[in-house]
Image (tube, coloured by chain):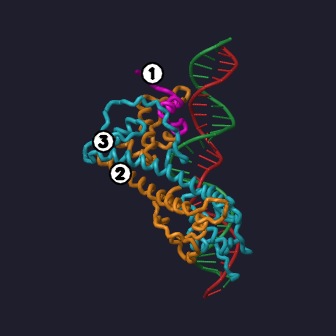
Chain colours: A cyan, B orange, C red, D green
Amino acid sequence: MSAGAVTIGEAARATGVSAKMIRYYEETGLLAPAGRTAGGYRLYTAADLHALRFVRRARDLGFTLEDIRALLALWHDRARASAQVRRLALDHVADLRRRIDALEGMARILEDLAAHCGGDARPDCPILDDLAAGRPDAPSGPQDASAATPRQGEHDPEASPSPRGER
Amino acid sequence: MSAGAVTIGEAARATGVSAKMIRYYEETGLLAPAGRTAGGYRLYTAADLHALRFVRRARDLGFTLEDIRALLALWHDRARASAQVRRLALDHVADLRRRIDALEGMARILEDLAAHCGGDARPDCPILDDLAAGRPDAPSGPQDASAATPRQGEHDPEASPSPRGER
DNA sequence: CCTTGACCTTCCCACCATGGGAAGCCCCAC
DNA sequence: GTGGGGCTTCCCATGGTGGGAAGGTCAAGG
């Protein structure tokens, strides 16, 4: 019962969070400083491992560390309202959906362009033509080669939270 | 005809690529160094603006700068085989699809959990329960606790291409 | 000619979350 | 008491992007 504490390497193996990240989470205040041996080694109790798994799972679900900070606070708050947790989760889902839509839009355009690309030894390629034409988005089928598109439209800088929609 | 060259600010406005990024692209060799005035100002010709729009469009489609480097080379290579371009595009699409699937998995799980969350003033919350249970395929993660929610979506943490599926 | 102010230059820092690696200390089994 | 594996801290890099400081350029107006 007492010997519950393990070193960071074992904690990493047990929770799937790398030792590097465990130290980082502590450094940034996401997790409380771990206990230490006389020699300075960090020690992790069962409760610490539980928290680490919580963080790991939340990361797997795409939450940012900032979100996780809030989730951990709610987790520790026995008087929390589930509505708060739910709101965090659904806000995150909305974010995920926005990113999915952005990626989906890119994929569709590229698939469309690739479908019209010979993919042979000849140089003609609607994909490069599209990039060179540099128009906004619109997966229209066959395009007229004209240099249409007045283009000075300032595209919406970022329609999504992360820079340029993905990545 | 000759007076076509503009400064970096005008190039930025005309192409939707920030001055900061234009310099960065030059610095990293994505684009050839721009011409300069006697005083050291960069000057952009119509052809330079064309290349900038190409890059902008490719970024909008989610290509990495590394990909764009290759696309630009193919664009400039009049003897290219469209198959090469097509392959680049389809590889990228596959990458996009992988990321979409990862995000979709996260969204579905969260929506499912949120659907079973009261979202009221009480503290009971399956979302936190799930995070705390940390059950995916975590090694040595026994317990079951309650509300294990027989989820349907699989989602496979370690199998994601980029570190943990997104970021 | 000189000032003014908008624009440009370079250089450094920050983000987010993560990994890599070096230099040095700790712990334990032998 | 020694060897080697694990731990410590510290710095650096990633990918793209933005912010800002310190200083030089340019063109218009006086």
Q: Are marks 1 and 2 on the same chain?
A: yes
What secondary structure is marked by label 3?
Answer: loop
User: Between residues D2 and C12, which one lies in front from this camera angle?
Assistant: C12
At label 1, counting other C-alpha atoms closer than 10 Å, the crowd grade (few under 14, some 14-19, many 20 or more) is few
* Residue B43, x across and y down, in percent: 49, 29
> Is residue A138 within the magenta segment?
no
Instruction: Report the residue marked by disc 2.
Output: B90
Going 51% across and 38% down the picture, which residue do you hit? A156
User: Magenta residues, as a range?
Assistant: B1-23
Q: Relative to B146, say whether A32 is above or below.
A: above
Q: Relative to B29, say whether A75 is above or below.
A: below
Check if mark 1's residue and mark 2's residue have beta carbons within 8 Å: no
Main secondary structure along the magenta-highlighted residues: helix
Q: CA distance from mark 3 to mark 1?
A: 32 Å
At label 2, counting other C-alpha atoms closer than 10 Å, the crowd grade (few under 14, some 14-19, many 20 or more) is some
| Chain containing mark 1 | B
User: Between residues B166 and A99, which one lies in front from this camera angle?
Assistant: A99
Left or right placement of residue A21 versus residue A135 in this view: right
Instruction: Report the residue marked by disc 1.
Output: B3
| Chain containing mark 3 | A
Left or right placement of residue A126 versus residue D4 in this view: left
Instruction: Report the residue marked by disc 3.
Output: A125
At label 3, counting other C-alpha atoms closer than 10 Å, the crowd grade (few under 14, some 14-19, many 20 or more) is many
Amino acid type indicated by mark 2: Leu
Q: Quadrant of residue A123?
A: top left
Q: Quadrant of residue B31?
A: top left
Q: Can residue A167 be spotted in the picture?
A: no
